[in-house]
Amino acid sequence: MSNTSDKVKQGFHDAAEKVKDVAHDAGLKVKDVAHDAGVKVKDAAHNVAEKTKDAAHNVGEKVRDAGHTVAEKTKDVVQNVGEKIKDARR
């Protein structure tokens, strides 16, 4: 039969094993949570990049359209000035 000292040692050993198991389980849960958070951050960054790309594309189209409008109006003004010069020479 084991003595009291051996029982105490066994109790400490069992308690240490339980603490080790709990710490291991907690570590796995933390790892899973960190992984999930990393995936969410990656997805959010991808969404931001896509929206930024779309916004830049839309701005580019608006700038192109505005440039075209300015060019058309400039052409019209130059033609009108040319016609007025011709009329003034007559």
Image (cartoon, rainbow, N blue to C red):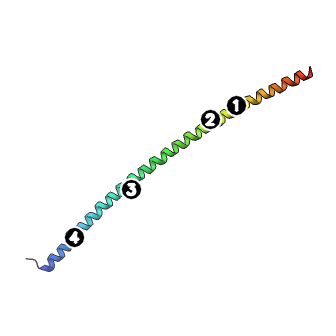
- In this view, the mark in front (2 or 4): 2
Kindly identify which residue carries mark 1: 69
- Mark 3 packing: few (<14 Cα in 10 Å), some, or many (20+)? few
Q: Earlier in the sequence, mark 4 or mark 3?
A: 4
Residue at image coords 58%, 38%: 57
User: Is 30 on the left or on the right of 54, as rendered?
Assistant: left
Label 2, label 1: how far apart the Cα atoms are: 12 Å
- Cβ atoms at labels 4 and 1 below 8 Å apart: no
Rendering quarter of residue 77: top right
Label 4 – label 3 distance at C-alpha = 28 Å
In this rendering, the answer to whether 71 lies above or below 29 is above
Label 3 sits on residue? 34
Type of the residue with mark 1: Thr
Secondary structure state at the residue bearing disc 4: helix
For marks 1 and 3, give the CA distance: 52 Å
Secondary structure of the residue carrying numbered label 3: helix
Q: Is residue 6 left or right of residue 32?
A: left
Residue 49 position within the rendered picture, expressed as x and y whole percent measured from the top left:
52, 45
Q: Amino acid at mark 4?
A: Ala
Per the model, the C-alpha gap separating discs 2 and 4 is 69 Å
Amino acid carrying mark 2 in the image: Glu
Q: Tell me the mark number nearer the camera, choosing from 1 and 3.
A: 1
Residue 79: x percent and y percent?
Answer: 80, 25
For marks 1 and 3, the one nearer the N-term is 3
Question: Which residue is disc 4 drawn over?
Answer: 15
Residue that appears at 27% across and 66% down: 20
Write down the residue under mark 2. Answer: 61
Q: Earlier in the sequence, mark 4 or mark 1?
A: 4
